[in-house]
Image (cartoon, helix red, strand yellow):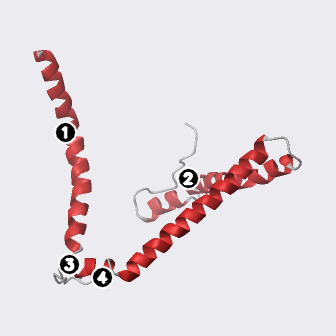
Amino acid sequence: MQARQSAIIFAWLLIAPALLYITAIVAYPLVDTFILSFTDASLRKTTNWVGWVNYEKIFNDTFATVIVRTFIWTFFSVSIKMIIGTFGAAMLNTAVPGRTLFRVLTMPPWIVPMAIGIFMWGWMYNGQFGMISGVLQRTGVVDGPVAFLAYG
């Protein structure tokens, strides 16, 4: 029993720094935002305490109308996308005329963004012309080009 309790305490001691760190990262912005919600904060340095005025502005008739419209739009948008997606999946998996054409037409939206991303990352890491190497040189962190993608 004693060994089990000491193991539990040891585990909590190991996890405590991470929990404190995460709590600080989440709690501070949350509390700060809550306090700011009771002020007329803007980009100016000075803020005035206005109390519940901001919440009264939010929960008026206009806000309720916007929320209802948002839910209606979301419902119909998701429903239409589900119907089109189900139809597309059926087209890809059943033997219907035009299935090969449909499969060919669905490939470019998957392949092109991936290919562009690969080329962009390759350009960014390029030792001579890459953006990362250029920024490091201009800020004085390194003296010459950095060959990130070189062997050895």
The residue under label 3 is: 52
Residue type at the position of mark 3: Trp
Question: Quick check: 75 above or below 104?
Answer: below
The residue under label 2 is: 125
Q: Which mark is residue 121?
A: none
Image location (x, y in percent) of residue 12? 18, 33
The residue under label 1 is: 16
Residue type at the position of mark 2: Tyr
Image location (x, y in percent) of residue 116? 66, 56
- Using residue 4 as the reference point, say whether residue 25 is left or right of it: right
- Of the residues under marks 3 and 2, which one precedes in the sequence? 3
- Of the residues under marks 3 and 1, which one precedes in the sequence? 1
Asked whether the residues under the numbered discs 3 and 1 touch, taking CB atoms below 8 Å apart as contact, a structural biologist would say no
Quadrant where the N terminus lies? Answer: top left
- Of the residues under marks 2 and 1, which one precedes in the sequence? 1
Q: Secondary structure at mark 2?
A: loop
User: Which one is in front in this view, the residue at disc 3 or the one at disc 2?
Assistant: 3
| Marks 3/2: CA–CA distance | 51 Å
Image location (x, y in percent) of residue 21? 23, 48
* Dot 3 alpha-carbon crowd within 10 angstroms: few under 14, some 14 to 19, many 20 or more: few
| Marks 2/4: CA–CA distance | 49 Å
Query: Is residue 41 in sight in this rendering?
Result: no
Residue type at the position of mark 1: Ala
- Using residue 66 as the reference point, say whether residue 152 is left or right of it: right
- Of the residues under marks 1 and 4, which one precedes in the sequence? 1
* Dot 1 alpha-carbon crowd within 10 angstroms: few under 14, some 14 to 19, many 20 or more: few
In this view, which residue lies farthest toward the left?
2
